[in-house]
Image (tube, helix red, strand yellow):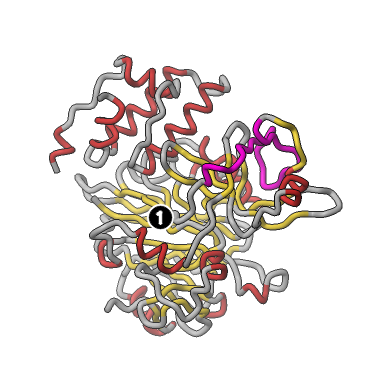
Amino acid sequence: MAKTLFSVREVSEMIQSGKILVVTGEEKLLQQLPKGKWIGGTIPYFMTEEKGGVCEKDLLFVNDFTKYAKNVNTATYNEANLKNLAKDGFENGFNFIIIPATQPVHMKFAIEGSNFEKLYLNPLVGFVAGVDLNEIGKVTPKVFNGADASMHEQEAVVMHVELEKGKTGKLSIINIFNQDEDSSSITFPVSGFSAKECMVNGQSLLLADYIAINEIDTKLPLVADYMGAQINICIESIDPETKYVNFLAPVFEGTVYKHAESLGNYKQTFNDSIPKHLTNESIVYSCNCILNYVHGGLEGEKIALNGSMTFGEIAYKLLNQTFVYLTIE
Amino acid sequence: MSESKLEIPAKNHIGWKKLIQGENKILLENFVLQVRVAELIQEVKAGKTKEEDAIEEIHDLFMKFANTAGEDLKKIFK
C-alpha cells in the first residue's frame, strides 16, 4: 500500500532531500513547509490509501514527481501573464498548474485557456484550490510556490516538468457521466460562467425556466461531447430573480450540451469505469472533484484510485466532476 | 508498441481537411486530440481559425503524440 498522507515534518524532510512534489492540504500546514522544489494548494478533501475518502486537517497529501523529472522550475502567474504558462515550459514534459478558486486567473484560464500559446503541446494538468466547504466565504483558497515558500491568493502557480527524451506525458479522464440521448440539445449565444438565455432544440428560452419546467436535477451536469470525450459543466446556482444560471466551468458559444444520464451508485460506477491495468502505481498524478465526493457520498468510502478532491480539475481545460490522471508513456 | 510505427499522413492529405471540417463523425480515443480537434472544428466553422492553421496544429499534435495516437489515425484515415 502506497502512503499518500504525510505529516508536516515528513514532507519537510522530503523537500529538504530535494524531492519534487505537489503538496495539497490545509493552509496552516502548507505555510510551515521549507523552500524547495514543490508547489502546493489548499484542499482538505482526499481519496487516500489509508482512510478512503477523508476531510483531513492534520496531514498533507503528496504527489512525488522526482523519479520522472529530468528538470523542473516553478513560477507564479497573474491575469496578465497567465497566457505564457505553457510557452514557458520545457520542450518535452508536462506542466502542472494550481489556481485559486473564484479569482480572476481562474476565470481567465477557464474561458481563454484554449487560446494560450502551445497549451496542447505538453500535458497541462492540475487543479483548482479550494477550502473546507463549511468555510466557504470565510477563508480563501491559496496556492504556494515552494521556490520561495510564498503563499498566493490571486495568482496561479505552475510547475514546469521536463521529461527524458523518448518519454511522453499523457492526460486522460474518467467521467462517469454521459449525455442523455433523450435530452434536448442546448446551446448558448455567449461563452461564460453564467447564462440567462439559451437555445433548446433551436428554440430561444430562459435556461432557468427550462430547468424548472422540466424538473431537471441540477446535481447532474450538462455534458458536451468533444469527439468522444464527455465534458461536464456543473450548475452551481440559479438566481430566481435575475434568472441567471451560474456554472462551475464556462459554457462555450457554439458547443452543444445535453443533460447527463442519472447515475446509480457513484462508487460502483466509478470502479467499473476504470480502464484495465490502470492502478495508483501506474498513475503519476490524479485528482477528482469535490462534487463527486459530496454527491457520491465518498466520505469514509473507498474508490480504487486516489487523489485530491478539488474545486475544479484541469486537463488542458477546466473540468467539473471528472477524474483526471497523468501517465508517462 | 506497434502504434509508433504508423506513418502520419502529410498535411495536404484530404483526410485532415475532412477531419477539421467535421465532415465525418469520428470518436477519437486520445484525450488531447478529442478536445483540441473538437475545439478547432468549431473555430474553423466560426471563422476564428483558418483551416490550414487548424490542420497544421492537429498534424503537429499527432506528431507529438505519435506513440499513443495510432488508433485515432486509423479512424481518421481508414
- Disc 1 target residue: A174
* Whether residue A56 is visible: yes
Q: Is residue A221 left or right of residue A70?
A: right
> Number of numbered discs present?
1
**SS for dot 1:** strand
Residues in magenta, as a range: A180-201
Task: Give residue A173's position: percent from left, percent from top.
Answer: 40, 52
Of B16 and A24, the residue lying toward us: B16
Residue type pointed to by label 1: Ile
Q: What residue appears at the point 37 percent right and 82 percent down from the top-left corner?
A: A50
* Whether residue A98 is visible: no
Of A73 and A202, the residue lying toward us: A202
Task: Give residue B74's position: percent from left, percent from top.
Answer: 24, 30
Asked if the stretch drawn in magenta spans residue A261, the answer is no
Q: What residue appears at the point 46 percent right and 73 percent down from the top-left corner?
A: A46
Of B67 and A304, the residue lying toward us: A304
- In the depicted structure, whether residue A249 falls above or below residue B8: below
- In the depicted structure, whether residue A251 falls above or below residue A5: above
Label 1 Cα crowd, 10 Å radius (few <14 / some 14-19 / many 20+): some
Q: Is residue A244 left or right of residue A84?
A: right
Chain letter for mark 1, please.
A
